[in-house]
């Protein structure tokens, strides 16, 4: 399935629900980068911008990217006065310009073809020395997830790292864990979920 189908799907996901008044950042982003000094960040699959807004309020300059124009437009309207650039990118074809101290890819999952390893490898190469790539994936299926396939497989963080095939002389895995937490869905539902957290630092 092509870009048009993916755009239509994700535009529909966001258009079918009211715009969030104050979107929350992802818990794993907050715990992973909350103590880092601010710099330049890229937020891949930014959605309505909970992560980008949180980072900007912490002093980061954020390039936020999503395939959905609906999501990007909502973030652009919400981020006036903050150092956030919201852009529509199909990550199969384009990537935010620049060099970054942080690239965040939280729950970058899609029902459409996406070579995630290639995208995340490009993200790692876009880091400055000392910069970090944070990848947070679903490790379980929440009741409110758009993907309720009982046979869906959730690769472990070390598998994701192996797929990137990054040179260990240049990139170091700082964290590869699968913590659990109680999450709240968009309709207020609560469930215990597993996250797969991978944090990679560029050392050279």
Image: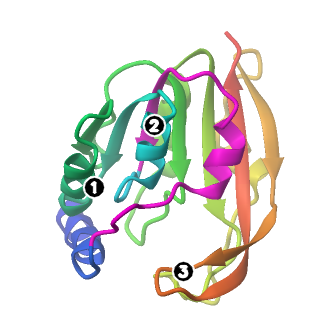
Task: Of the two numbered discs 3 and 1 on the same chain, state the one appearing first in sequence.
Answer: 1
- Marks 3, 2: nearer the viewer: 2
Question: Which residue is under mark 3?
Answer: 185
Please provide the residue range marked out in magenta: 19-44
For the residues marked 1 and 2, what is the alpha-carbon distance in whole angstroms?
Answer: 24 Å
* Quadrant in which residue 196 is drawn: bottom right
The answer to whether residue 2 is above or below residue 153 is above
Question: Which residue is under mark 2?
Answer: 57
Q: Is residue 123 left or right of residue 19?
A: right
The answer to whether residue 152 is above or below residue 78 is below
Name the residue at 69% across, 26% down: 201
Q: Does the residue at mark 1 contact the one at mark 2 (Cβ under 8 Å)?
A: no
* Quadrant in which residue 173 is drawn: top right
Question: In the structure shown, which secondary structural element does the residue marked by tag 1 occupy?
Answer: loop
> Dot 2: within a 10 Å radius of its alpha carbon, few (fewer than 14), some, or many (20 or more) residues?
some
Q: Quadrant of the N terminus?
A: bottom left
The answer to whether residue 76 is above or below residue 156 is above
Name the residue at 19% across, 71% down: 8
Question: Which residue is under mark 1?
Answer: 67
Provide residue 66's location: percent of width, then percent of height: 31, 52
- 119 in magenta: no
- Marks 3, 1: nearer the viewer: 3
Question: In the structure shown, which secondary structural element does the residue marked by tag 3 occupy?
Answer: loop
Provide residue 149's location: percent of width, then percent of height: 56, 88
Between 33 and 146, the one nearer to me in the picture: 33
> Dot 3: within a 10 Å radius of its alpha carbon, few (fewer than 14), some, or many (20 or more) residues?
few
Question: In the structure shown, which secondary structural element does the residue marked by tag 2 occupy?
Answer: helix
Q: In this view, does 15 lie to the left or right of 196?
A: left
Between 196 and 23, the one nearer to me in the picture: 23
């Amino acid at each position: 399935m092509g870009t048009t189908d993916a755009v239509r799907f994700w535009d529909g996901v966001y258009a079918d629900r009211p715009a969030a008044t104050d979107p929350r950042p992802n818990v794993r982003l907050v715990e992973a980068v909350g103590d880092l000094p601010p710099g330049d960040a890229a937020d891949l699959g930014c959605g309505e911008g909970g992560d980008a807004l949180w980072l900007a309020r912490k002093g980061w300059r954020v390039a936020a990217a999503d395939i959905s124009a609906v999501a990007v437009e909502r973030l652009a309207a919400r981020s006036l006065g903050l150092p956030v650039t919201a852009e529509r990118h199909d990550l199969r074809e384009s990537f935010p310009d620049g060099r970054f101290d942080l690239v965040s890819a939280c729950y970058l999952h899609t029902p459409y073809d996406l070579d995630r390893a290639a995208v995340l490898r490009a993200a790692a190469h876009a880091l400055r020395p000392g910069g970090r790539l944070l990848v947070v994936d679903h490790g379980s299926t929440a009741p409110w997830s758009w993907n309720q396939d009982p046979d869906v497989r959730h690769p472990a963080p070390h598998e994701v790292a192996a797929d990137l095939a990054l040179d260990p002389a240049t990139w170091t895995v700082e964290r590869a864990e699968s913590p659990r937490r109680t999450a709240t869905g968009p309709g207020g539902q609560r469930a215990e979920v597993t996250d797969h957290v991978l944090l990679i630092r560029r050392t050279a």
